[in-house]
């Protein structure tokens, strides 16, 4: 199945099972100041997960475009993207594990056609201190499903990712972890703000035995290893708790929040550990090959970064975000400027948005027509940002090399000049310094922040 087929098949199945398809939310939620972007399907549904009645009932599904700015630095590997679509199904106090887990299994194996014996899962090991039990119920359901297909169903307690990296899963189909199997939008139970919902989750991974485990990420492979053999493709969160001042309270209703990564499921469906080979991303990669005369195999990282970042910036522009110095605008600026930087590695110095936006628009024409409808305006927004940066970037990169030449220590003042004079986002300068093996002064951040603060104070004073 290609990605469009996976998306449609998911919606068709869920609707057939009594779910109402709800419209996607924008990438920037209008009345949620707690996060910059819609980073998961649950954010727009927060009031209903906390107990309010949803007008469409208790069984919902959606396909939610998401943006995770925190993953920007990981883009370049074979699995991370900042923008992605999340396939979601929701039980608001309706069904629970006994219906959810077989439903997802059916979707992945019978509908999408993934090989059952390449699916591995995880479950929550329990948190005795907080009185939250081990999720043996999910594990038992998985075990039954695996046995029905005649495949192994053994389990292992791994606890932490670090321990898993040391001992591996030994091929166990079901692995129990602690905080890795707790889901809230903030992360583990300790990170949750008071009032936020969360709960144990059961995650699903696809195994790529053809990939050699990368031991930089631990001695042995296991479900939650970044070593390349296992790719997380979805999770079912059993959202039962709300964080309180002194612990956790049960929510009035126990919910299910399934999130499936469309790009990753589509990659598994074509047996590719590399998501950039799927039908949603491949056309952009091919366009970059045409424009640069280089092959994806020879310029993999640069092509992935440009492909991901310009797709994300295109959708941000379609949703009304504009590059700027604050909040969402700053993330968008970083995306476009990082794309410009990596396009330079492809020998593309003139800006590529005018070539890439039409490809993205065509790819999504049937699903998100708003991109094609606003194509000219999106190109204009991205091109303006590309041009502003392309003019100064090469001078900035030259200055950085000069600052660090001969092992000289680069301090906060130099990094501030790169930002102030050449428009280099600080994250990009630091990344560039690492690429060039330059030595940064340990105190660079404090010096940089102080200079930035002084500049902002001057600018505020001049506007009075
Ligand atoms: N199902 C929750 C998430 O992964 O975003």
Image (cartoon, rainbow, N blue to C red):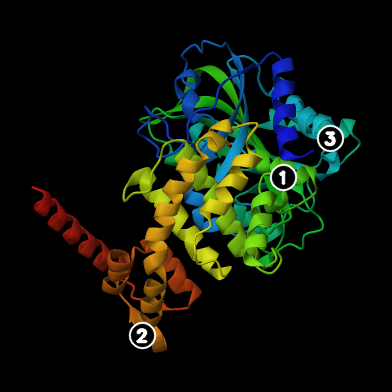
Q: Is residue 278 left or right of residue 25?
A: right
- N-terminal label among 1 and 3: 3
Q: Quadrant of residue 243?
A: top left
Label 1 environment density (alpha carbons within 10 Å; few <14, some 14–19, many ≥20): some
Picture layout, residue 30 above or below residue 347: above
Ligand 1 quarter of the rendering: top right
Towards the viewer: 89 or 332: 332
Q: Nearer the viewer, mark 2 or mark 3?
A: 2
Towards the viewer: 111 or 368: 368
Identify the residue position indicated by label 1 in the image: 279
Q: How far apart are marks 1 and 2 (CA)?
A: 46 Å
Q: Is residue 199 left or right of residue 31?
A: right
Is label 1 in contact with label 3 (beta carbons under 8 Å)? no
Identify the residue position indicated by label 2 in the image: 408
Residue at the image point whose x is 67% and y is 52% from the top: 276
Identify the residue position indicated by label 3 in the image: 146
Residue 187 can be seen, yes or no = no
Is label 2 in contact with label 3 (beta carbons under 8 Å)? no
Towards the viewer: 155 or 59: 59
Q: Where is residue 28 in the image (x, y as percent from the top left)?
A: 43, 35
Q: In which quarter of the image is residue 3?
A: top right
């Amino acid at each position: 199945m290609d990605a469009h087929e996976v998306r449609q098949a998911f919606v068709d199945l869920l609707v057939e099972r009594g779910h109402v398809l709800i419209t996607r939310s924008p990438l920037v939620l209008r009345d949620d100041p707690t996060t910059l972007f819609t980073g998961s399907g649950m954010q727009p549904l927060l009031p209903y997960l906390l107990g309010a009645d949803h007008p469409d009932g208790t069984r919902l599904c959606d396909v939610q475009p998401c943006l995770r700015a925190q993953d920007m630095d990981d883009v370049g590997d074979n699995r991370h993207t900042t923008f992605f679509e999340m396939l979601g199904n929701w039980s608001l106090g309706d069904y629970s594990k006994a219906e959810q887990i077989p439903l997802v299994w059916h979707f992945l194996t019978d509908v999408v056609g993934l090989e059952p014996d390449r699916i591995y899962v995880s479950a929550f090991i329990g948190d005795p201190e907080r009185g939250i039990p081990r999720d043996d119920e999910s594990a038992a359901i998985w075990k039954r499903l695996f046995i029905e297909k005649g495949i192994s169903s053994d389990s292992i307690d791994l606890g932490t990712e670090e321990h898993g990296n040391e001992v591996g899963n030994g091929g166990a189909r079901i692995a129990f972890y602690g905080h890795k199997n707790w889901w809230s939008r903030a992360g583990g139970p300790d990170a949750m703000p008071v009032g936020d919902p969360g709960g144990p989750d059961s995650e699903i991974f696809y195994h790529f035995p053809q990939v050699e485990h990368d031991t930089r990420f631990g001695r042995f492979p296991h479900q939650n290893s970044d070593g390349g053999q296992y790719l997380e493709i979805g999770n079912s969160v059993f959202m039962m708790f709300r964080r309180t001042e002194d612990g956790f309270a049960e929510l009035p209703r126990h919910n299910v929040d399934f999130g499936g990564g469309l790009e990753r499921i589509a990659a598994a469906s074509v047996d590719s550990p590399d998501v950039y080979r799927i039908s949603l991303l491949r056309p952009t990669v091919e366009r970059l090959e045409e424009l640069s005369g280089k092959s994806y195999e020879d310029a993999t990282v640069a092509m992935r970064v440009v492909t991901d970042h310009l797709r994300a910036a295109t959708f941000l522009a379609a949703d009304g975000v504009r590059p700027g110095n604050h909040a969402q605008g700053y993330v968008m600026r970083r995306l476009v400027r990082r794309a410009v930087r990596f396009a330079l590695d492809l020998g593309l110095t003139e800006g590529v948005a005018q070539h890439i936006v039409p490809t993205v628009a065509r790819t999504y024409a049937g699903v998100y027509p708003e991109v094609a409808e606003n194509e000219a305006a999106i190109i204009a927004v991205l091109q303006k940002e590309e041009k502003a940066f392309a003019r100064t970037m090469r001078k900035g990169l030259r200055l950085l090399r000069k600052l660090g030449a001969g092992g000289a220590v680069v301090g906060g003042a130099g990094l501030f000049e790169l930002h102030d004079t050449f428009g280099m986002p600080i994250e990009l300068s630091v990344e560039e310094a690492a690429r060039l093996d330059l030595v940064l002064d340990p105190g660079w951040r404090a010096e940089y922040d102080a200079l930035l603060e002084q500049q902002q104070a001057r600018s505020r004073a001049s506007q009075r």
